[in-house]
Image (spheres, helix red, strand yellow):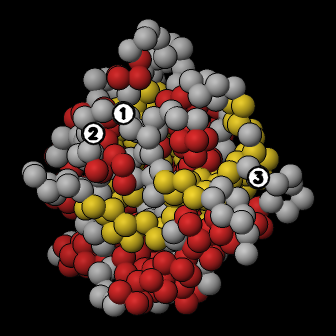
Amino acid sequence: MLAIGLISGTSVDGIDAAFVEIDGDVNHPRVQLLAGETYPYPEELRERILEICAGKALSVEELADLDDAIALSFARAAMAIQQGQPRAEIIGSHGQTVFHRPPDGEKLGYSVQLGRGESIARITGIETVSNFRAADIAIGGHGAPLVPKIDAYLLSHPTKTRCVQNLGGIGNVAYLPPRQGEDWESRVFGWDTGPGNVLIDLAVQLLTDGERTFDRNGEWAATGTPCRELVDRWLEDPYFHLSPPKSTGRELFSPAYLERSREDARGYDLSAADWLATLTDLTAASIAHSYRTFLPRLPDEVLLCGGGARNDYLRQRLLSYLGKNVKILTTDEVGLNGDFKEAIAFAVLAYWRINGFSGNLPSVTGAPGPVLLGEIHAFPAV
């Protein structure tokens, strides 16, 4: 099957589109990436999305207009990625998360992904699966993270224990035990570890008055010295000590969170590079803390993916926290493109949905059982 996966993550960098061929059965899918591309949002649209993620109020009419604008951008990305390729049979679109609230007691979780699938299906004329998180949330799960099941089916090893660590705006991990025995899937774990690039990116934008949006390869942070006392203080945040399943987003690791961290840093007389190094160190330290606190054992290998996988300084700091017995690689090095892995995942989730195969992992999302993920939309193209 020829499928397209679409996602824009918490960094709101643009729409990642993956055009893939999927074959094999649902339990052993084989995925070949035929094309991958990131399509930036129009700057005005990106700014509107970031404002909403930061809590700006808007009317229902404005919400509808934003939903339509994001759907149009996603549809255009789907059509662009097919140039020079055969026509796709299905689209799996995650959309753009603008709000995520984990479940709390009797209150169900709530997660909003804009860019409605029915519009994408109507514009492209291709069957589209979207709103993947809703079904898991409806039965009491977090609806996140969803990618660990794809990681388990595509990246698990017969003898090695692996962690797949995504470093997008928010960091999340999939713990993959060796793929042995009939119950191996029940021993897969995953959760949001905390900030990935979000605080680093926000800090760079603040320090450069918006001229730069990220720290390329961690080069700026590498010129500074992290303040471990501050990192230890930030690690006292209750989120880091909350047992999985758990999920988070820009609602917690927000511009307001960054401003508090900046105020904390002023008490230590840190340079801009020192502050950036300390924020980068928080990402590494929070990942290591999460592994040591919640995993049955440290993995044999950590497979990095997402934009932060290219941050050499972050990778060095993570290695220093995990120790020499843990090998750090990228998913590219084991055969799965790390830049488009999340987009690939939603192509696979769409493939699973139309084949009646559950897409969630209850051990990851906290749902009471497996469930089909995603709503299916099919219309003639306009």
Spatial separation of the CA atoms under disc 1 and disc 3: 28 Å
- Determine whether 82 is above or below 210 in the image: above
Circle 1: element type:
loop
Quarter of the image for the N terminus: give it: top right
Spatial separation of the CA atoms under disc 2 and disc 3: 32 Å
Q: Say whether residue 46 is left or right of residue 299.
A: right
Q: Say whether residue 168 is left or right of residue 249.
A: right
Of the numbered discs 2 and 3, the one sitting upstream in the chain is: 3
- Determine whether 150 is above or below 282 in the image: above
User: Residue at left 21%, top 50%?
Assistant: 240
Residue 329 lies, in percent from the top left, at 57, 36
| Residue 114 seen in the current view | yes
For the residue pair 86 and 343, the one nearer the viewer reads as: 86
For the residue pair 55 and 66, the one nearer the viewer reads as: 66
The residue singled out by tag 1 in the image is 370
Q: Label 3 is placed on what type of residue?
A: Ala
The residue singled out by tag 3 in the image is 88
Q: Which mark is residue 367?
A: 2
For mark 3, does the 10 Å Cα neighbourhood hold few (<14), some (14 to 19), or many (20 or more) residues? some
Q: Say whether residue 329 is left or right of residue 319.
A: right
| Image-quadrant location for residue 278 | bottom left
| Residue 148 seen in the current view | no
Please count the marks in the image.
3
Q: Are marks 1 and 2 in contact (CB under 8 Å)?
A: yes
Circle 3: element type:
loop
Residue 96 lies, in percent from the top left, at 48, 68
